[in-house]
């Protein structure tokens, strides 16, 4: 799933909103390609190994990127606790997403994971006691209707495995909040490096604890599956790099609606790779979820703009 993070001290290099949008659309394609590859790998590679390679690859790439641009403070952060929480949340998000892709069609997993903005609204109201206007509640209801259209209780897609993408959406909503706080104190590349570092360390411990089952399974993995794993990790890391470039060129509020382009790419790759085409109701549900998510972000942007204007008065 596309990760929209704070700009983290970046100023726009150029006032090129069109280029930022184009890069954002390409970003959603890379994330959809990464998820499609996970679906293609299936159970050929143990889940822990899949996650370990994904975050190890990101850690190496981001570390090299940081050194090449002359920023040697790889471990310098304004909040160690938030960095650890962010890493655990993203790792849990990835685990839920990968598990969901093993059991559900790609468009279904992607659609339900896109409920994150709506879940953020619910968490703000229930846990933080924030005032949520009726317009945002309307978007929550609309998103819930879209979810029902996608999974259709009583249909073939409605199984207990839908908890995986819903869990991914929930952890991603929390991840967004933590990322927003970190963007005020840390550089974005440093944050991505530290996230990958912590996730890799956690996965090393988990693999060691589960080595009796994981290691024999790894011995059975074919070369073609390892190549697919490397491609998946490359696409995920490349997507994060593209995201940073998009954020240099256009504001987050403008880019966010285009993140829902991942739904279209997920449907396309599902058709090309697996011959699975969303039926009429699923397609309508995907559009409804996208509309509710975009509506939620636009309402949030309008509120932020109003608050900023009031502060200037």
Image (cartoon, grey):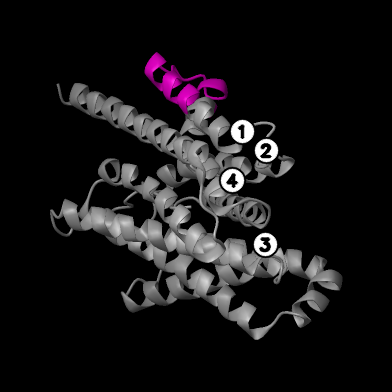
- Nearer to us: label 4 or label 3: 4
Could you tell me how far apart the alpha carbons at marks 4 and 3 are, in whole angstroms?
18 Å
Between the residue at mark 2 and the residue at mark 3, the CA separation in whole angstroms equals: 32 Å
The residue segment tinted magenta is 123-142
Q: Position of residue 144 (x, y in %)?
A: 53, 27
Report which residue position mark 1 lands on.
Answer: 152
Residue 158's disc number: 2
Sequence-earlier tag: 2 or 3? 2
The residue at which mark 4 appears reads as 168
Disc with the residue nearer the chain's start (1 vs 4): 1
Contact (Cβ within 8 Å) of mark 1 with mark 4: no
User: For this rendering, which residue is in front, 182 or 254?
Assistant: 254
Q: Residue, x 61% and y 82% (percent of image)?
A: 224
82 sits left or right of 246 in the view = right
Disc ID at residue 202 = 3
How far separated are the C-alphas under marks 3 and 1? 36 Å
Q: Establish if 293 lies above or below 191.
A: above
Q: Position of residue 93 (x, y in %)?
A: 59, 50
- Assess whether mark 1 and mark 2 are in contact (beta carbons under 8 angstroms): yes
Q: Secondary structure at mark 4?
A: helix
Give the side of residue 40 with respect to residue 242, left or right: right
């Amino acid at each position: 799933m596309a990760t929209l993070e704070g700009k983290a001290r970046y100023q726009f290099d150029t006032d090129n909103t069109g280029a930022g949008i184009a890069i954002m659309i390409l970003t959603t394609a890379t994330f959809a390609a990464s998820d499609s590859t996970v679906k293609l790998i299936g159970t050929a590679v143990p889940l822990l190994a899949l996650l370990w390679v994904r975050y190890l690859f990101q850690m190496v790439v981001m570390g090299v990127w940081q050194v090449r641009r002359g920023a040697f403070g790889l471990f310098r952060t304004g909040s160690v606790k938030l960095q650890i929480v962010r890493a655990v949340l993203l790792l849990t998000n990835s685990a839920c997403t990968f598990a969901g892709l093993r059991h559900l069609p790609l468009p279904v997993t992607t659609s339900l994971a896109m409920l994150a903005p709506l879940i953020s609204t619910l968490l703000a109201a229930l846990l933080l006691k924030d005032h949520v206007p009726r317009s945002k509640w309307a978007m929550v209801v609309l998103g819930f209707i879209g979810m029902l259209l996608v999974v259709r209780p009583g249909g073939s897609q409605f199984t207990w495995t839908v908890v995986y993408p819903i869990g991914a959406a929930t952890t991603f909503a929390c991840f967004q909040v933590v990322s927003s706080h970190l963007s005020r104190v840390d550089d974005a590349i440093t944050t991505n490096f530290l996230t990958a570092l912590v996730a890799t360390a956690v996965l090393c411990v988990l693999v060691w604890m589960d080595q009796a089952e994981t290691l024999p399974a790894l011995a059975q993995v074919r070369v073609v599956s390892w190549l697919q794993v490397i491609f998946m990790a490359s696409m995920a890391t490349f997507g994060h790099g593209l995201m940073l470039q998009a954020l240099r060129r256009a504001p987050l509020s403008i880019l966010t609606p285009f993140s829902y382009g991942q739904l279209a790419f997920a449907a396309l790759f599902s058709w090309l790779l697996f011959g699975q085409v969303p039926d009429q109701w699923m397609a309508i549900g995907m559009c409804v979820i996208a509309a509710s998510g975009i509506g939620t972000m636009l309402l949030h942007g309008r509120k932020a703009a109003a608050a900023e204007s009031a502060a200037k008065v």
